[in-house]
Amino acid sequence: MIESETPDEPLLEVEDLTLGLEASRRPIVDCLSFRVHAGQIVGVVGESGSGKTLTGLSLLGLLPPAIQRLGGTIKFDGRLLSRSADWLGRGISMVFQEPMSALNPVLSLGFQLNEALVGQRRRMSREERKAKGISLLRQVAMPDPESRWNAFPHQLSGGQKQRALLAMALASEPRLLVADEPTTALDVTVQAQVLRLLMNLNHRLGLSILLITHDLGVVAQTCEHVLVMDEGTLVEEGSVDQIFGRPSHAKTQELVAAVGAEKALASRSHPTSGARHP
């Protein structure tokens, strides 16, 4: 693992994480180590089947029943996470890949936001939760949040669904957001809006983000540090400039060639690390 240039203690520290089918003991993710510091946006990039989504799920104790953590440690905010209960209320939230699947189609947005707030803020009245929910919708730039409160998922556009999921993820006031392919199902224009929103949340809230994607172009626009995975293994790690300018592993070179290094780096119109770049 390449040492981060950031001198402070990491918010998230993963050491030798190994995931796999317990029956076969064959690793799907093999001895993965990385760090995320406060206020940092770290990209995890790789093709389908590289293990990046399972890595994200493992951080919240949400692995599918058939997948086990076979080894390694996960430390968040200085505390080892070893049991499922350790993840509850620990300041990590996740936004999933397909917003229509993540939202309940028969419940209004307001009902679902209220439920998210009930789990985090038990002492709030229903009116206070609604006020907080609308505030969260404003925070993610949901248009006309008061009227969207009673809307159902099918009445929201793709970008609005993703904003709704972000609002729910922020209900717990997380310090780390795991965003699993948050723009894959969106068209190019809406994708750019969601990426700008993530960068804005990072800047305003100091929110650390682990951005999981197959698209190095997205990484170039948003991240400062990149992890490249292939077949469950971390094959390369470094800053965006290192990964695009001097890729050393064949898989990284292949991914960079697919997007074009000069074009990708040109998309970085301003720094994306909100905590350290005002």
Image (spheres, rainbow, N blue to C red):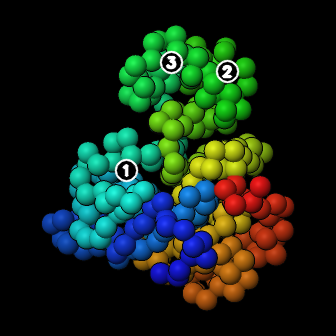
Mark 3: few/some/many CA within 10 Å (<14, 14-19, 20+):
many
Please tell me whether residue 30 is drawn above or below residue 130 in the rendered image.
below
Query: Vertical placement of 18 versus 202: above or below?
Result: below
Point out residue 119 in the picture as x, y percentages from the top left corner: 38, 28
Image position, residue 127 (x, y; %): 52, 10
Left/right of residue 31 with respect to residue 130 in the rendered view: left
- Secondary structure state at the residue bearing disc 3: helix
How far apart marks 2 and 1 lie (CA) works out to 29 Å
Q: Which mark is residue 60?
A: 1
Mark sitting earlier along the chain (2/1): 1
**Does the CB distance between marks 2 and 1 fall below 8 Å?**
no
Disc number placed over residue 145 in the picture, else none: 2
Mark sitting earlier along the chain (3/2): 3
* In this rendering, position of residue 30 left or right of residue 84: right
Q: Does dot 1 land on a helix, a strand or a loop?
A: loop
Callout 2 amino acid: Pro
Mark number, residue 129: 3
Q: Amino acid at mark 1?
A: Leu
| Residue in view at x 57 percent, y 73 percent | 7
